[in-house]
Image (cartoon, rainbow, N blue to C red):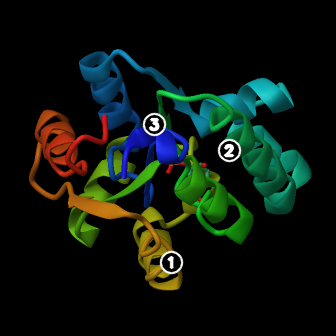
């Protein structure tokens, strides 16, 4: 299948802390494609931060902004789109992703995820408020199969973002780019 048969974008999905944003920036440099982060698009569209949206409007309002952000991010070609960890929860988002590009799920073992999310700035991920370790365990369980729809997956455990980007590029179908 050639890239012109469907939307030509690379879409990164995966749990919080799998490195989607960092890897998307590396891929963007490598390919010369624009990179977009749906969390950043949400901030721009809503005119407020993600913690503010959760606190003032609730998670459903956040998910509505997120669907809007997914649509906007996928409205062009040759983009690397890093999505928020929960962007895969709505079927309409998943279908758009599959239609508009190559969807790659980044994974990592639980210990790595906990290490990464607890070393990130506190308070930036409302779903992990309180006992972040316990929340990661709960969410991982409830999202056990949430990323299975992706075309491909790359395990990021014990790999640098550069190694993940390389592996992802090597895994693209022949002639896809
Ligand atoms: C969320 C993940 C976050 C952000 C929001 C909700 C989730 O993005 O969209 O806090 O539901 O998993 P990252 O995966 O970039 O942290």
Q: Please tell me which residue is depicted at 35% across the width and 22% down the height of the picture.
A: 28
* Circle 1 crowding by C-alpha within 10 Å: few under 14, some 14–19, many from 20: some
Across and down, in percent, residue 27 comes to 30, 29
Instruction: Read off the residue under disc 1.
Output: 143
Q: Residue 121 carries which label?
A: 3
Q: What element carries label 2?
A: helix
Badge 3: residue crowd in 10 Å (few <14, some 14–19, many ≥20): few
How far is the residue under mark 2 from the one under mark 1?
A: 19 Å
Label 2: how many residues lie within 10 Å, few (<14), some (14-19) or many (20+)?
A: many
**Foreground tag (3 vs 2):** 2
Q: Residue 42: name its quadrant.
A: top right
Instruction: Give SS at disc 1.
Output: loop
> Considering only vertical position in the picture, is 153 above or below 3?
below
Query: Residue 18 location in percent, x, y?
Result: 33, 52
| Between marks 3 and 1 in the image, the one whose residue lies nearer the viewer | 1
Q: Which residue has dot 2 on it?
A: 70
In 3D space, how far apart are the residues under numbered discs 3 and 2 (Cα atoms)?
24 Å
Give left or right: position of 155 versus 81.
Answer: left
């Amino acid at each position: 299948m050639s890239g012109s048969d469907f939307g030509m974008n690379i879409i990164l999905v995966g749990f919080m802390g799998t490195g989607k944003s960092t890897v998307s920036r590396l891929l963007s440099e490598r390919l010369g494609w624009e990179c977009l982060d749906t969390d950043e698009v949400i901030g721009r569209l809503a005119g407020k931060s993600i913690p503010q949206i959760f606190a003032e409007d609730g998670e459903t309002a956040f998910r509505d902004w997120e669907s809007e952000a997914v649509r906007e991010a996928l409205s062009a070609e040759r983009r690397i789109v890093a999505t928020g960890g929960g962007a895969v929860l709505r079927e309409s988002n998943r279908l758009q992703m599959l239609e508009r590009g190559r969807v790659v799920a980044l994974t990592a073992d639980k210990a790595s995820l906990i290490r990464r999310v607890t070393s990130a700035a506190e308070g930036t991920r409302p779903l992990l408020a309180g006992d972040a370790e316990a929340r990661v365990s709960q969410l991982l369980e409830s999202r056990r199969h949430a990323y299975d729809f992706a075309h491909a997956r790359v395990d990021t455990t014990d790999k640098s973002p550069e190694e993940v980007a390389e592996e992802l590029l090597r895994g693209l179908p022949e002639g896809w780019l």
